[in-house]
Image (cartoon, rainbow, N blue to C red):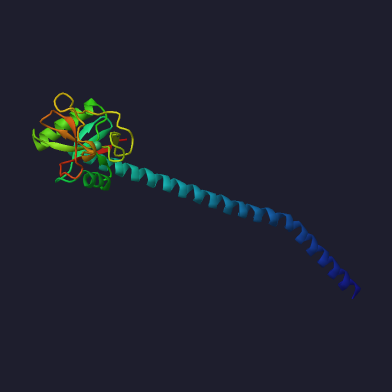
Amino acid sequence: MQLRGTSLVLLVLYLLQTTHEQAPNTKPRKNAALKKAVVTLSMIEDIKKQIAHILEEVSLLKENQALHTVCLRGMKVYKKCFLLMAGQKSFHEAADDCILHGGTLSTPHNHDENDALYDYARTTLGEDHNIWVGVTDISVEGDWMDVSSKSANYTNWEMEITKQPDGGTKANCVALSGPSIGKWFDESCSLQKNYFCQFNIP
Ligand SMILES: [Ca+2]
């Protein structure tokens, strides 16, 4: 009976020791599993970021592709292209239509761009073309701004014969004239004219 009691005590002691020995091994395993889970989550976050980045790049590439397709149909100048739009519209309808197409109403910023737009209009619409240019003084009379509300640094007014701009508050929009070899005239914004949109090429 005493022997059985001693054996029982020894067995309990053995079990306690075994449990105590195993305990330190269990913790690192749990930590390792936890660490593994944390790494996996961080990896998923990284992958998500990479996918978002790739999608952004694909969208940019598609946009560029669309722009180049537009530019193939139109006239390319340095870092932008002009595209003839169908039909005639008032200045503001034309400007809105260009925004709808992802561009702005054509606005030459230097003599080369004005020449390019004039040449393109001449070949597509003929010598007598009269087209809108994205410049207006509708906000403040005499303060000519482009369609992005920046002061127009470049203008090409007809000055030799008619001394443009000469229409005052009745003429707040700009037309480029074919018969005047690309010179600008201030005209009533409600007139219906052909127009070109411009698209910036990155
Ligand atoms: Ca005016």
Between 85 and 90, the residue placed more toward the observer is: 90
Outermost residue toward the top?
Answer: 160
> Residue 109, position in %: x, y?
27, 30
Quadrant showing the N terminus: bottom right
Between 197 and 171, the residue placed more toward the observer is: 171
Dividing the image into four quarters, tell me where ligand 1 lies.
top left
> Residue 45, position in %: x, y?
50, 50
Q: How many marks?
A: 0
Residue 134 can be seen, yes or no? no
Outermost residue toward the right?
Answer: 2
Quadrant showing the C terminus: top left
Q: Residue at x 49, y 47 (%)?
A: 46
Q: Quadrant of residue 70?
A: top left
> Horizontal placement of 67 versus 48: left or right?
left
Residue 35 can be seen, yes or no? yes
> Residue 108, position in %: x, y?
24, 32
Q: Quadrant of residue 90?
A: top left
Q: Quadrant of residue 191?
A: top left
Q: Does 161 sit above or below residue 55?
A: above
Q: Does 59 sit above or below residue 108?
A: below
